[in-house]
């Protein structure tokens, strides 16, 4: 028995395949889904989703959204997504470093909106770098 997993972003379907297991970055922590899972609707955070394949785990960077699990079908609707194997690791590292520097600059700012935007940009850059195979401390 397998799961049918679909990751759908506004501009494309990022993943549509069968798997025996998926790990999702929910807003309350990671959720592991196996065949026969109870029906579920969950909000997803910006994070790395992992799908088990015959060749190992495939990382997919998710930019927040929702997941529905029902009858061994996992439908994931997201604001954006990228497969880790399509992300240039060095470019992702550079973007992550730049986002860290920007966050450090605005961290003590009084402008709340600027802090929120810098935090979101840092989370997205971190997730892209992690999905590409980069190691992030902390």
Image: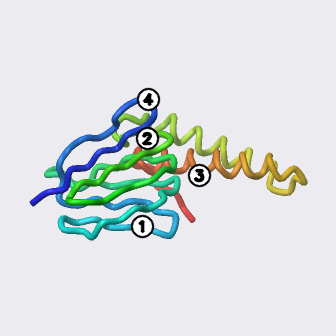
Mark 3 and 1 residues: CB-CB less than 8 Å, in contact? no
Report helix, strand or loop for mark 1.
Answer: strand
Residue at x 68% of width, y 52% of height: 119
Please name the residue that numbered disc 2 is placed on.
81
In terms of secondary structure, where does tag 2 sit? Answer: strand
Q: How many marks?
A: 4
Q: In terms of sequence position, does the residue under pointer 4 or pointer 1 come before the other?
A: 4
Q: Is residue 79 left or right of residue 52?
A: right
Q: Nearer the viewer, mark 3 or mark 1?
A: 1
Q: Quadrant of the C terminus?
A: bottom right
Q: Earlier in the sequence, mark 4 or mark 3?
A: 4
For the residues bearing labels 2 and 3, Cβ distance under 8 angstroms: no
Where does the image place residue 108, in percent across and percent down from the top left? 86, 57
Mark 3, residue position: 123
Residue ID for mark 4: 11
Q: Nearer the viewer, residue 71 or 105?
A: 71
Q: Secondary structure at mark 3?
A: helix
Furthest residue in direction left, as rendered: 1
Q: Are marks 2 and 1 in contact (CB under 8 Å)?
A: no
Residue located at (33% from left, 55% from top) = 50
Residue drawn 20% across the image and 44% down it: 17
Callout in the foreground (2, 3): 2
Q: CA distance from mark 2 to mark 3?
A: 13 Å
- Give the labeled residue for mark 1: 30
């Amino acid at each position: 028995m397998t799961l049918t997993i679909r990751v759908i972003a506004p501009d494309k379907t990022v993943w549509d395949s069968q798997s025996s297991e998926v790990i999702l970055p929910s807003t309350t922590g990671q959720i592991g889904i196996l065949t026969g899972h109870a029906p579920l609707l969950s909000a997803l955070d910006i994070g790395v989703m992992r799908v088990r394949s015959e060749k190992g785990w495939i990382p997919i960077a998710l930019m927040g959204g929702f997941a529905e699990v029902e009858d061994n079908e996992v439908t994931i609707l997201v604001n954006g997504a990228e497969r880790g194997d399509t992300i240039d690791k060095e470019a992702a590292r550079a973007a992550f470093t730049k986002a860290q520097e920007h966050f450090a600059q605005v961290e003590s700012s009084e402008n709340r909106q600027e802090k929120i935007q810098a935090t979101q940009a840092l989370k997205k850059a971190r997730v892209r770098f992690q999905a590409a195979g980069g190691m992030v401390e902390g």
